Image: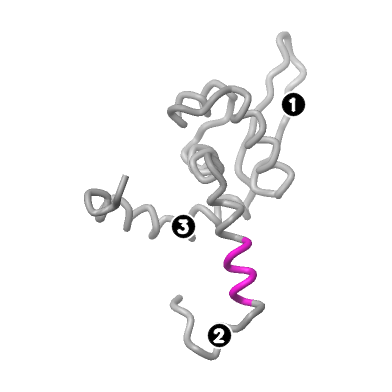
Amino acid sequence: MTPNAAQVDEKSCAIFQRTLERVGQRWSGAVLYAAVGGARRFGEYRRAVEGISDRMLALRLKELERDGFLVREVIPSTPVQVLYRPTPAGAELIAALQPLGDWGHKHLAELPD
């Protein structure tokens, strides 16, 4: 839905900016996208998000869990397994951002490096 002039006020601009900053933080969007794409274990995220360090991946998983976009599940086994899956809000956010990804695929060659 495209906002009209009546919908764009100070509060809605602040909410929009806060959302963009959260998902636009380096690696956050890619990690969340990997979650919605089926990644569950740490190694699956590492393979899906090329270039991310283990330290940064651990940090982003923790932040996305804290923000309510991922759920962390500990499976008591030997060794212990830790799984991360998207919450409904996380899946909804990626669905809302999918048109942005589509736009990027269409215009990637036009974007500066």
Residue 30 in percent (x, y) is at: 49, 41
Describe residue 101's horizontal placement relative to residue 65 as left or right. left
- Where does label 3 land, which residue? 97
Between 63 and 96, the one lying in front of the other is 63
Mark 1, Cα crowd under 10 Å, few <14 / some 14-19 / many 20+, is: few
Q: Which residue is at a point 43% across and 28% down the rendered structure image?
A: 50
Magenta segment boundaries in residue numbering: 12-18
- Where does label 2 land, which residue? 7
Q: Which label sits on residue 93?
A: none
**For numbered disc 2, what is the local secondary structure?**
loop
Residue 5 in percent (x, y) is at: 49, 88
Disc 2 to disc 3, C-alpha distance: 20 Å
Disc 1 to disc 3, C-alpha distance: 29 Å
Q: Amino acid at mark 1?
A: Val
Q: Is residue 88 above or below residue 81?
A: below
Q: Residue furthest front?
A: 113
Q: Quadrant of the C terminus?
A: top left
